[in-house]
Image (cartoon, rainbow, N blue to C red):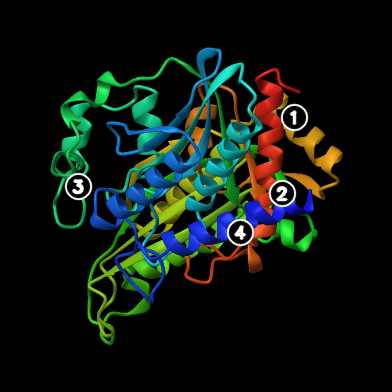
Amino acid sequence: MANELKLIEDNIIKALDALQKFTATPGFGVTRFPYTKEARDACSYLKKRMEAVGLAVRMDNSGAVIGRLEGKSPATIMIGSHFDSVKHGGAYDGIAGVVCAIEVARLLKESGMELGYSLEVIATNDEEGARFNAGLFTGKALLGQLTCEELKTQVDVDGISVYQAMAAYGLKPEEIAEHKRDDIKAFIEIHIEQGPVLEAEHKEIGIVDVIVGIKRARIRINGRADHAGTMPMHMRKDALEQATKVISKIGDRARLFRNCVATVGFLQVEPNVMNIIPQSVTFVVDIRGVDEESIMAQYYSLLADLDKMSLESGLTYDVENLLYAEPVLMDEEIKSYFEMSCINREFEYMHLPSGAGHDAQIFGAKLPAAMLFVPSAGGRSHCPEEKSEASDLAKAVLVAYDAVQTMSGLK
């Protein structure tokens, strides 16, 4: 097995070293947004890698690259992750899972065994949502969850819509609702953990039990701008002072719930001048948890805090709901195949939740899906310092390879 692992590691390193060069920000991390030159270059490279291992390759109407290995049945086991990135991101998030999926296909092709089901390696597009503030694009397209009108309303910072970007890229946005897939039997994703747990527990493989749900809302507290020196304290309508009273409770409340986190990562103060009392404060709260009850309990408590603030201060507030994604359980049967492989190959593993959203989340809401995590150095991700060991990624390849064989009736 040592020689097998070494070859997989070498292939992974070679591919990731090449792919990290396809960035709009050389020297400052990977920035690879959908429908850009960097995306096209990365897709061209992935297409060549897939063809080199014997896959029939195409680009679908979402901009995803798909390599297919025909089996006895046209029903398809799909394995992969995304090729896009956040701004100034790392060289492993998403793309490492695509490279690993190609290695799984290579091993299956070289084994000479005929699969019971067909296999597709997929490099999905716009999972991050970094350009158009949406995300999980390919999964939504394959599951028939997008409309042409939606593509026209989602725009980037330059006002370019998804519709326009797709058309310029050579795709057919007007057909986005016509490419729903009904043949996908299961979805498997290998991904870096993006957190510190596996490294801290000295585990080589993580088997994901659940992908957390997310509740995201934009809140605006409305006060009044006045002179910072002449307005008495008891007469002020200070939006920032009141916002801090609400925000300060969000983190402590999340700590009361198991496997929950809550973050205020965006804060905008107006007029944001040092000698003017803030007229308004807008902040975005992001609440994540493994069950709907704990997520919504936090959200309703936040609304109660806002009501109390408004009653006591006389300030008003507005709430805009931005996102709600339900927690998604990973498939128990596929997880058992992962576990069996780890035991047989003597890999150190553990079960854990995913605190981030992934392609497997959108697929897992509709069909059997499962995820494998590998450790992230220092828990770092979405930054140039992002790093995972090729040896761990290679072990995930073997676990997924074993699982696909079992699912296809070959083991």
Q: Are marks 1 and 4 in contact (CB under 8 Å)?
A: no
- Residue drawn at point x = 78 percent, y = 46 percent: 350
Which mark is nearer the camera, 1 or 2? 2
How far across and down, in percent of the image, does residue 392 sit? 69, 55
**What amino acid is labelled 3 in the image?**
Val
Pick whichever, 37 or 90, lies toward us.
37
The image quadrant of residue 398 is top right
Of mark 2 and mark 4, the one earlier in the sequence is 2
Residue 147: quadrant of the picture: top left
Q: Label 2, secondary structure: give it.
A: helix
227 or 127: which is nearer to us?
127
Amino acid type for the residue under numbered disc 2: Glu
Rendering coords of residue 200 (x, y %) = 76, 63
Q: Tell me the number on the disc at residue 155.
A: 3
Amino acid at circle 4: Asp
Residue under circle 1? Answer: 337
